[in-house]
Image: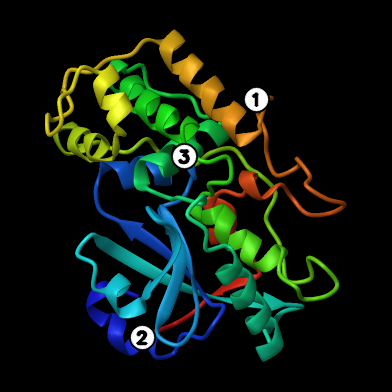
Amino acid sequence: MTPDGGAASAARLRTGDVLLLRRRGPLAALTAWFGDSRFDHAAVVGRAGYLIETGSGGVIERPLAECLADEQLLEAQARRPLVAARPLQDPDRIAVLAHALSLRRPAFSGDPLAALGRAAALRDRALPDSAPLRAALREALLHAAADSAGAMSASEFVYRCFAENPAQPRGRLAPNLPAAAPPTQAFPELDWDALWPQIGSWLRPSRREALGLAEGDPLAAGLHADAEELERALAQARQRLGLMERGNALLALAGPRLPNPKCVRMRELELSPSLQPLEL
């Protein structure tokens, strides 16, 4: 589904369907790389004409048409959830919707810089030797570390909508996830001139002050960080997320058979056999 053909395509979407989204800009490209996917965001179709997603105000509802008309959107791919190889029945769709709506709390913020910080904290990836990149990730990690402990990534939110809803037995609607595999995505080519303003626009006043930036000052393009600074920021973010050990993956269990939702990457959603691509 492309943005220009979104209106007609959206008419076929049903409550509980999933949208995988790819947006413009280096911040989105970095987030997608840490998720080992070409998509950087995901959302659940809610009530007629609305989408439920993580946003800067928490988990939010917004018109589906607004999402598809967003000039920052490059691609939207629709997925239909399956259980036992069959599309969800109406009671199950209602259960998914009810849980998605129950997660609408400001504490579950999802601004793009925090999303990058959480993705970087949760995924062990070998990084190019780049001081500016380390500085960018340091700011994202510190931003995530200062966020609410309950803040979620987009992939975590979508997974929880299906795994934690009231449908019985508990977890019956949880998507089947492929086994974790080595990363496949090449590191993206970044437009640094575009990245710094994106990061700076989300910095909190306290962090701007720490960097010596007055209100309205642009983030310095020459910002650098060494490996030790990045490691300290990583430790702070992982502590906030409750992940004290390195290398957490899908085998880290939150219950008797379900993976830890925080360890669900965009890659697992993209490749899940429980989310069937829709031809729209």
Residue type marked 3: Phe
Q: Which label lies toward us, 1 or 2?
A: 1
The alpha-carbon separation of the residues under discs 3 and 2 comes to 29 Å
In the figure, 277 relative to 13: above or below?
A: above
Give x and y (percent) for residue 133. 32, 24
Q: Nearer the viewer, residue 219 or 43?
A: 219
- The tag earlier along the polypeptide, 1 or 3, is 3
Give x and y (percent) for residue 53. 46, 64
Residue 249 occupies quadrant: top right
Question: Badge 3 is on which residue?
Answer: 34
Q: Nearer the viewer, residue 39 or 238?
A: 238
Q: Secondary structure at mark 2?
A: helix
Q: Secondary structure at mark 3?
A: helix
The alpha-carbon separation of the residues under discs 1 and 3 comes to 15 Å
Q: Nearer the viewer, residue 193 or 37?
A: 193
Q: In this image, 99 relative to 106: left or right?
A: right
What mark, if any, has residue 98 been given in the picture? none
In the figure, 154 relative to 236: above or below?
A: below
Q: In this image, 253 relative to 234: left or right?
A: right
- The tag earlier along the polypeptide, 3 or 2, is 2
Q: Residue at x 62, y 66 (%)?
A: 161
Question: Badge 1 is on which residue?
Answer: 246
Give x and y (percent) for residue 272. 62, 62
Q: Quadrant of the C terminus?
A: bottom left
Q: In this image, 3 relative to 259: left or right?
A: left
Question: Badge 2 is on which residue?
Answer: 9
Residue 272 in sight: no
Residue type marked 2: Ser
